[in-house]
Amino acid sequence: MPEIPEQTRLVARAAFPRGLLAMRVRDSLGAVFSDAEFAGLFARRGHPALSPAFLAMVSVLQYAEGLTDRQAAEAVRGRLDWKYCLALELNDSGFDASVLSEFRNRLVTGEHSDRLLARVLQVLSEHDLLGPGGRQRTDATHVVADIRLLNRLEIVAETMRAALEALAAAAPGWLAAHTALDWWDRYARRASDYRLPQALPARDKLFRPVGQDGFRLLESTYGGRAPDSLREIPAVQVLRQVWVQQYYRDHVRRPGAREAKDLPPGLLSIGSQYDAEARYSIKRGMAWRGYKAHFTETCPDDRPRLIVHVDTTEAARRVRGPGRLHLHGLRLDRCTLVGAHDQTKAASTSGEHSGERPSSRSNSTHR
């Protein structure tokens, strides 16, 4: 990143003699990121690309203040302390808010986010804010998946509909030859509870035909004459897993709904065909379906507490003892923190019921 323009420096210092957080970050750490290290993060299409180092610093400030993309873009245009930290001219007009989401997509797609954090930790170590030895602790919090909570009937109907849509896009001719006419009426619209029967006997009566349709589609897809590529479609694989979890077949191969006691535990249960990795879990009395974010921070007595590692796992995964997160040691190695004493908060390894089946409080357990 370039040097701070003189006019920006003078105006910001006159307005905030004691400095603000963004200004103190720039004064203490300098330019944290450089474009040479993250050349792969330049946009390849559209308008002239913005500096990845610049956008990375904007993202850090945005997270520190809990701003939306639009608020962060406005802060770049209108706040003196941000212009000071980002080395912008006072008349810089900034950028459109959509640039930030596109930058994050490139971060995730190219797996550069780990390198960004490593660079931050390296700079902190160079400024004696991070060093060997000491204590660290890890705790976890919930991450709710961006999915609609479904009951059992909605799950199977929506999973069947998603598989049909995926097959219709991949092999429309094959699908037309292997579907029944009543499927088009049954799965034409999204399965929603207000459209489904409300009485339990009527719901049970519908649950079985959906299962029979799914088994028929799976037998056709996994049959010897079906193209191999159809079995690789993610929606078809999810259909097979959901049918194993929700149905059984009797001695004459008629489908039946599994009883609640026979449903898989939260570690395995699929609650949405659109995010098959989102899992059900309970922690401190809170139930959710999604993921779990693990944060590791240093606990020194004479230095600021710093987050040195972040990892996201399935919500129902239990983690215990040292080395429970496979990237944990790698992150600490980079900062010469090997051998740091680990204090895992009890909340991240106990008080959660990840092996339980979704309870009656979750609407995903009832038809």
Image (tube, rainbow, N blue to C red):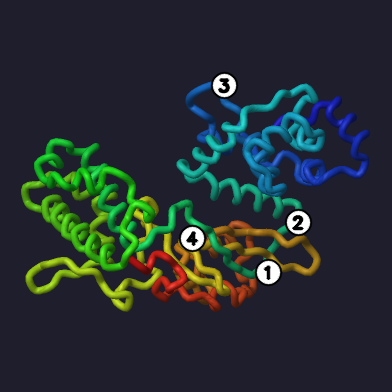
Q: Nearer the viewer, mark 4 or mark 1?
A: 4
Q: Earlier in the sequence, mark 3 or mark 2?
A: 3
Q: Nearer the viewer, mark 4 or mark 2?
A: 4
**Badge 2 is on which residue?**
128
Mark 3: which amino acid? Answer: Pro
Q: Which mark is residue 133?
A: 1
Mark 3 and mark 2: span between their CA atoms? 37 Å
Left or right of residue 133, residue 284 in this image:
left
Left or right of residue 182, residue 336 in this image:
right
* Image: 144 above or below 355: above
Q: Earlier in the sequence, mark 4 or mark 2?
A: 2
Q: Earlier in the sequence, mark 1 or mark 2?
A: 2
Mark 1 and mark 3: span between their CA atoms? 45 Å
Question: Element type at marker 2?
Answer: loop
Question: Element type at marker 4?
Answer: strand
**Badge 3 is on which residue?**
48
